[in-house]
Amino acid sequence: MPTEKKEIVVLGAGVIGLQTALALLESGYSVTIVAKYWPGDEHIDYTSSKAGAVSPTYQKMERDIGINPIHKQHWRTHATPDDLQGQRFDKETYEYWLELVKKDEDAGIVLIPSIYIWDHPTPETANSGASIWWSTLVPTFTPLTHPHPHLPATAHFGISYKSFSLNPQKYLTHLLSRTADHGVKTHTHEVHCLSEVFEHVPDAVGVVNCTGLGAIDLVDPVEASKLFPTRGQTILVRGEAEMVRLRLGDGYIAYVVRRPGEGTILGGCKVDGDWNAEVDKELSKEIVERCKILAPELLFDGEFDVISEQVGRRPSRKGGPRIEVEWKEMEGRKRFICHHYGHSGAGYQSSVGSAREAVALVQRELEKQQ
Ligand SMILES: Cc1cc2nc3c(=O)[nH]c(=O)nc-3n(C[C@H](O)[C@H](O)[C@H](O)COP(=O)(O)OP(=O)(O)OC[C@H]3O[C@@H](n4cnc5c(N)ncnc54)[C@H](O)[C@@H]3O)c2cc1C
């Protein structure tokens, strides 16, 4: 715990910026968040919130019935067996959310039954899934073998378990209000270089750079060349799927994620380096066909009732998230920059663990300076 309240700027108000700001505040720092986009804003450059390309029909429906076409987020770890840091981030977030769902119904998170299906053998499917690193973390982890009503005949293996489904807008709003409880200051501004934040917060000892894909314009060219979008496309349909279902097929991923009270998200795709913000209609057809077998309970006369289609850009980075400090002379003083971006498709599910790591790094760096 710092003895006196040092001022720190968090640049960015996505899930990474807000979770980092909260962790800093809880560790006794004074925090100002500077960001262009905030919870409630809608822009494709704001991955944590709504990700663009909403059809005019849908916008009308949104006005009429008050639903919101953001991508549904859920906890599905991507951490490989040798990615111990990723595992730790995802585990800490899972455990944090387990407590949060008990305490706060308004946080936008629910714990729901989930099914995970593999079409082909992988190291994870060996030994009935016993080597899956998170098999002992998630409640009710159960291997599914044929015949099973939730395992398609052509699939190789599956598991059922409890996972989280999350309403991003609600969760971001929850985080922002938690930071407000701790006295956070906020400033809406687009910066063109990192040192610019100190013009607005001159007493700050440093900045945590949580700008997602926006970091491309703020870091050095070598680092910027490591950053790229991973395009995602999802479809919101009417009706609520009974559970989260995800299938890893031959060169594709298909998922259905229930959004309680609003509908179900069908997905998806992951295309590295693709900046296209427009809906790919052919891809939408493929997503729909793949999801029919995953959520037959939502079909009306063999078809989904489509409400909207969305495109989003996951903020990816070669080598995984960057959590790294550098010291620089900025606005007349030596100050730190803690980079904290590049979470690709795992920004929500790793947010708590990743924020704790960034804050621990900041604390160690500041202690070294004393
Ligand atoms: C289709 C899709 C499905 C996904 N599914 C999941 C999932 O199931 N689970 C999961 O964990 N993750 C999922 N993700 C990934 C997740 O959404 C991202 O990892 C996460 O939102 C990234 O958050 P962020 O805070 O790093 O970036 P952003 O949310 O993009 O926030 C960046 C912030 O920085 C600000 N900023 C940037 N540049 C500047 C500047 N120059 N000046 C001022 N402010 C600036 C922005 O205004 C914004 O406030 C999905 C993503 C997509 C697209």
Image: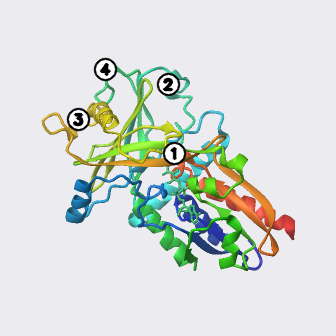
- Categorize mark 4 by other alpha carbons within 10 Å: few (<14), some (14-19), many (20+): few
Determine the secondary structure under disc 1: helix
Q: CA distance from mark 4 to mark 2?
A: 16 Å
Which residue sits at x=48%, y=20%? 121
Q: Mark 1 = which residue?
A: 345
- Categorize mark 3 by other alpha carbons within 10 Å: few (<14), some (14-19), many (20+): some
- Closer to the observer: label 2 or label 1? 1
Determine the secondary structure under disc 3: helix
Q: Mark 2 = which residue?
A: 125
Residue type pointed to by label 2 = Thr
Determine the secondary structure under disc 2: helix
Q: Mark 4 = which residue?
A: 153
Name above or below for residue 210 compared with residue 247.
Answer: below
Q: CA distance from mark 4 to mark 3?
A: 15 Å
Q: CA distance from mark 2 to mark 1?
A: 22 Å
Q: CA distance from mark 2 to mark 3?
A: 25 Å
Q: Is residue 199 visible?
A: yes
Residue type pointed to by label 4 = Ala
Residue 270 image position (x, y, % from top left): 47, 38
Residue type pointed to by label 3 = Pro
Determine the secondary structure under disc 4: loop
Q: Quadrant of residue 252?
A: top left
Q: Mark 3 = which residue?
A: 296
For marks 2 and 3 on the same chain, the one whose residue lies earlier in the sequence? 2
For marks 4 and 3 on the same chain, the one whose residue lies earlier in the sequence? 4
Residue type pointed to by label 1 = Gly
For marks 2 and 1 on the same chain, the one whose residue lies earlier in the sequence? 2
Pick the residue in front: 147 or 170.
170
Classify mark 1 as within 8 Å of ligand 1 or not, answering yes or no.
Answer: yes
Q: Is residue 300 left or right of residue 98?
A: left
